[in-house]
Image (cartoon, coloured by chain):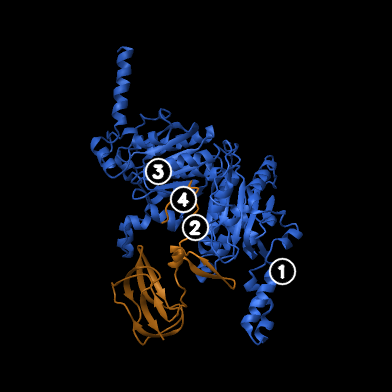
Amino acid sequence: MSIKQKIQELVTRMARLHAGGGEKAVEKQVASGKLTARDRIRTLLDPESFHEYDLFVEHKSRDFGMAGKELPGDGVITGTGTISGFPVCVYAQDFTVAGGSLGLAHARKITKIMDHALKLGVPLIGINDSGGARIQEGVNSLAGYGEIFYRNTLASGVIPQISVILGPCAGGAVYSPALTDFVFVVDQISKMFITGPEVIRTVLGEEISMEELGGARVQAEISGNAHFFAENETQCFEHIKRLIAFIPWNNRKQADAFPPKPPRPDRPVEGIVPPSAHEPFDVRDVIRAVCDDSDFFEVQEHWAANIVVGFARLKGRSVGVVGNQPQVLAGVLDVDAADKAARFIRFCDAFNIPLVTLVDLPGYLPGVDQEHAGVIRHGAKILYAYSEATVPKITVILRKAYGGGYIAMCSRHLGADFVFAWPSAEIAVMGPEGAANIIFRREIAAAADPESMRREKVREYQAKFANPYIAAAEGHVDAVIQPAETREYLIHAIEVSQHKDEVRPRRKHGVPPF
Amino acid sequence: MAETKNGSAKETRLDEAELARLHVDGADYRTRLTRKYALRPRYERRDPRLVRAFIPGEVRRILVAPGQRVQRGEGLLILEAMKMQNEVTAAVDGVVRRVAVGSLQKVAKGELLVELE
């Protein structure tokens, strides 16, 4: 055979494998509003940047008619490429090949690209579209999942791991995404659950559709399993590209700096927060008023919306922003909010992204459901995450900072490097109403007009304690600043914290209240 | 679900109609409630004399009859769920007033099984 013929043979072999599960299966995939695995990788990565490996890998199963059955790529495509020039490792399950089912060869391709990502120190992006375990391969398929979970855990906090759910991802398979840093879902396409509607119907007698049980909206709004919700696959890939630009390649690097851009405020920052502590506003307006280009990339926008987390830039440098959201549940901390913030704080800390915290909360959400759901141990996660974080931590108290909420929101006492307060800040052991009711209980009860006495005592407490100056007098607040100076103070604080290097006692790892 | 606001420099307007009141530590705050908050389970004090299914399943066998005296910890019926035969026991001493289910009946979670007095 001439070299030309040999090359021709390679081209023919590759073309057959590139066709995936064949025309019919591909047609079905496209008809359901999904891109093919290969097109997904092409859309996500820079043009011509994808380099595929292990295209010729074959399964070795013999049982249940599997012998000689050709499964191109064993149902998964793996390789390396770039996103806006950033290197990444990527894999995409191919639903057209045996339903993207996971057998041992399939899993070994995934674990091999994961090992690469870890060695090369680059982000890993996994595109999930699979019917689950390849039943014919029995326990080998389970072994495959386990080996993936193990690597997800080893890579956690070393390289960013991104899961994209573009099809079913059910049973044990969902635990890989759950172990990764960011989960992307797409409306009507993503389906995640441990036990499906069929099992729930037969065992429990409860009727529920796949969409209602574990669709994209449920995961993005109710369960908090997903971090980013998109209307379609193209929008989902745009979100991934934005995220990649905010985070570093690995935990030994800083996120790339971008050219600084001023915010594009549509009104002065001091006009955003209403003077009455009882009135709502959107904390994202404050974030956009101070960050570069007013560009705030929110994480878990729809779940636990009483706290806002996400990425922004200050003078070109990435920061992670955590802010209480007064317009949702008054910005209280609850089980979900603490969980959401703690996870985000730990991601930022692992990947050298400074933390900016904006505070305005009345405290913790009261309720039997909260107490019984374990708001104590969940609420403790946020204390743990802030205390543990050694990246620069800068806190701005916008308005209310009462009681346990004040402590939890990256107070000086949890190791904040800089704590600033607006003149509107109210830093106190509790809100004036609650405090007055307790301190002046007797006077109020004995008064001829208890209601007017209560109002008077609330005003008295307010005048004395509902301000930033008592905390500033103790040094718990470093500076009381004008709202318009916030951006300048934040940028300066981050600049002078560039070389912060906090050393903690040696330990294997902490034991956070998971 | 709200429209995605990512990347928008536009101020987000509050919809007055959406605002409710949330009471925290003596003060009322004007704010939006979440769907999850609105749907949260209300706490109900449990009456130990009303024995309910702790898991959905099928009643396999009934071990007591009305009028029978039972002691705390005594089996009332066998409830099969998730391939396990679970013995449902009395949480308090009492007399069976009523058995609310029949043998081989499928029951939902929380459904009344036996009433004691």
The residue singled out by tag 3 in the image is A235
Circles 2 and 1 on the same subunit: yes
Callout 1 secondary element: helix
Q: Give the left or right position of residue B40, taking residue A101 as reference.
A: right
Alpha carbons under labels 2 and 1: distance apart: 32 Å
Depth check, mark 3 against mark 4: the one in front is 4
Image side of residue A473 versus residue A432, left or right:
right
Chain under numbered label 1: A
**Quadrant position of residue A403:** bottom right
Q: Secondary structure at mark 2?
A: loop
Residue matched to label 4: B5
Chain identifier of the residue bearing label 2 in the image: A
Q: Nearer the viewer, mark 4 or mark 2?
A: 4
Q: Amino acid at mark 3?
A: Gln
Q: Residue lying furthest front in this view? A: A267
Q: Mark 1 and mark 4 in contact? Answer it, CB < 8 Å.
A: no
Looking at the image, is mark 2 or mark 1 earlier in the sequence? 2
* Chain identifier of the residue bearing label 3 in the image: A
In percent of width and height, residue A390 lies at: 65, 47
- Badge number at residue A305: 2
The residue type indicated by label 1 comes to Lys
